Image (cartoon, rainbow, N blue to C red):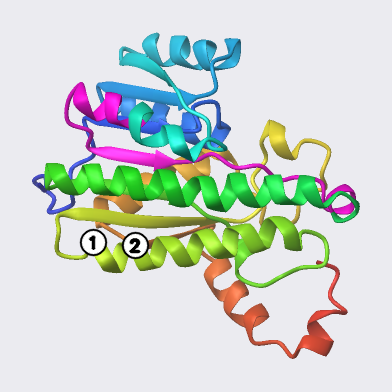
Amino acid sequence: MKDASGLARLPQSLLVLGGTSGIALATARRLVARRTRTVWLAGRPSPALEEAAARLRALGADVRTVAFDALDPAAHEEALGKVFAEGVIDMVLLAFGILGDQAYDEREPLDAVRVAQTNYTGAVSAGLVTARMLQNQGHGSLVVLSSVAGERARRTDFIYGSSKAGLDTFTQGLGDALHGTGVHVMAVRPGFVRTPATAGREAPPLASTPEKVATAVELGLRRRSETVWVPGVLRLVAAVLRHLPRALYRRLPL
């Protein structure tokens, strides 16, 4: 459906996977301020999840929570099925993920595996489950928070970056598989975003905010984009870095 401007309409109902994510909540606030009326926040039960729900209710949305754990794929079908059984979901925002600690995780492989399982394996499971449910409806958008970190491995975060590279490739392939079904799949590739999760880390010149990512997500939804970069100039930066000779790339302070 399109509005009078010819752009796609924003969703009336939203399911957020990763209900305490700063970027996801900024996006939910922006969508509620425009058209969204029903929001499901999926995440591990916690005071933070309930607080996030309360803040969205204060904006006038009908907000519900559902227990969801990215590291428990066997439970995804049942947990997310309950949400879709309650009514139509116009948009799913897959926003969970962890940064990890590169130096520590290199010494503790099990912690590195947890990063990979959360960011990739859990996302593959949840993405396939929700994509099928959206397809059964015949419409809807699946928006996946990827990262520019997945474009090329960096010494400082290659564990996290590799998980996002896998997620990004999965998202592109899923979008191709669902083309023509009525389901829109969009990958969002932000650079460094200032959130509580990145507190204490030095922000690069092109650092963004959750609100800027939310703005880009809205525009991407209206345009039915398949890939969104935040900020947009990162598309060019990534293209240059992707083709640098490896010997030169290693010398960069990345």
Residue 20 visible here:
yes
The answer to which image quadrant residue 87 occupies is top left
Q: How many numbered marks appear?
A: 2
Magenta run includes residue 197: no
Instruction: Name the residue at 67% across, 79% down.
Output: 241
Instruction: Name the residue at 40% across, 8% down.
Output: 58
Q: Nearer the viewer, residue 21 or 235?
A: 21
Up-down relation of residue 60 to residue 121 (above or below): above
State the extent of the magenta-drawn residues as a range: 80-105
Q: Nearer the viewer, residue 114 or 1?
A: 114
- 197 relative position to 141: left or right: right
Up-down relation of residue 152 to residue 166 (above or below): below
- 159 relative position to 209: left or right: right
Task: Report the residue marked by disc 2.
Answer: 174
Name the element at disc 2: helix
The label shown at residue 201 is: none
Location of residue 29 in the rendering, given as x and y in whole percent from the top left corner: 41, 26
What is the C-alpha distance between the residues marked 1 and 2?
Answer: 6 Å
Pick out the residue farthest to the front. Answer: 74
Instruction: Name the residue at 60% across, 44% down.
Output: 118
- 210 relative position to 83: left or right: right
Instruction: Report the amino acid beneath label 1.
Output: Leu
Instruction: Name the residue at 26% across, 57% down.
Output: 224
Rate crowding at label 1 as few (under 14), some (14 to 19) or many (20 or more) other CA atoms within 10 Å.
some
Disc 1 and disc 2 in contact, CB within 8 angstroms: yes
The label shown at residue 178 is: 1
Name the element at disc 1: helix
The quarter of the image holding the C terminus is bottom right
Location of residue 179 in the rendering, given as x and y in whole percent from the top left corner: 21, 65
Instruction: Report the amino acid beneath label 2.
Output: Leu
Location of residue 233 in the rendering, given as x and y in whole percent from the top left corner: 55, 66
Up-down relation of residue 94 to residue 183 (above or below): above
